Image (tube, grey):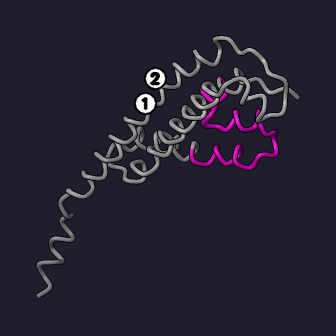
């Protein structure tokens, strides 16, 4: 079966966090494609927790960057697929060379925009929450117990 570079690039862009690009290229039996669901789901759970419980939820702090990293890796796959030459793509998949025109190029442009934004946002969010957690004053019960011990 012939696998289109354009389709693979757009699948990585639009559904890469769910592993659709891997399932398209390697088949439904690809374990790594199905494993994309776990960190994506955990990241979405973190977003829902933060919306429900607020920004003080430390579990959400840990889970939200997972979603950002999954989006960033999907954009990286889209960029790599889109920038692979048609000849290398055909040789890798052992199929005849197809002219892909502008389809992958437009997906690469979108992936660069989305990937850079999400990656920088995830890094900034993670670092901010880490330092907030590190600089957080001890709770009142911890202060009282430290005063009681000689």
Magenta stretch, overall SS? helix
Q: Nearer the viewer, residue 11 or 53?
A: 11
Above or below residue 2? Residue 129 is below
Q: Quadrant of residue 86?
A: top right
Above or below residue 118? Residue 136 is below
In the picture, measured across the screen, residue 115 lies left or right of residue 53, that is right
| Rendered residue at 33%/43% (across/down) | 55
Q: Which structural element holds mark 2?
A: helix
In the image, which residues are magenta?
10-39
**In magenta stretch: residue 63:** no
Would you call the spot at circle 2 few (<14 residues within 10 Å), some (14-19), or many (20 or more)?
few
Please provide percent x and percent y for residue 117: 41, 29
Please provide percent x and percent y for residue 130: 30, 52
Quarter placement of the C terminus: bottom left
**In magenta stretch: residue 23:** yes
Q: Which structural element holds mark 1?
A: helix
Number of marks in the rendered image = 2
State the residue position of label 2.
Answer: 113
In the picture, measured across the screen, residue 113 lies left or right of residue 92, that is left
State the residue position of label 1.
Answer: 116
Q: Nearer the viewer, residue 105 or 32?
A: 105
Please provide percent x and percent y for residue 64: 45, 44
Tell me how far mark 1 sits from mark 2, CA to CA.
6 Å
| Rendered residue at 52%/19% (across/down) | 109
Q: Nearer the viewer, residue 94 or 5?
A: 94
Q: Are marks 1 and 2 in contact (CB under 8 Å)?
A: yes
In the picture, measured across the screen, residue 142 lies left or right of residue 79, that is left
| Rendered residue at 71%/15% (across/down) | 100
Quarter placement of the N terminus: top right
| Rendered residue at 21%/64% (across/down) | 139
């Amino acid at each position: 079966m012939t696998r289109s570079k354009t389709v693979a690039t757009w699948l990585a862009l639009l559904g890469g966090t769910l592993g659709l690009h891997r399932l398209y290229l390697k088949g439904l039996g690809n374990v790594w494609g199905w494993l994309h669901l776990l960190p994506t789901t955990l990241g979405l759970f973190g977003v829902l927790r933060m919306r429900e419980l607020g920004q003080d939820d430390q579990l959400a702090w840990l889970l939200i960057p997972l979603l950002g990293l999954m989006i960033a890796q999907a954009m990286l796959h889209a960029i790599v697929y889109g920038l692979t030459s048609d000849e290398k793509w055909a040789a890798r998949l052992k199929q005849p060379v197809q002219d892909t025109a502008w389809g992958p190029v437009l997906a690469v442009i979108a992936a660069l925009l989305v990937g850079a934004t999400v990656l920088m946002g995830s890094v900034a969010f993670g670092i901010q929450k880490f330092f907030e957690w590190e600089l957080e004053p001890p709770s009142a019960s911890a202060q009282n117990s430290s005063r009681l011990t000689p």
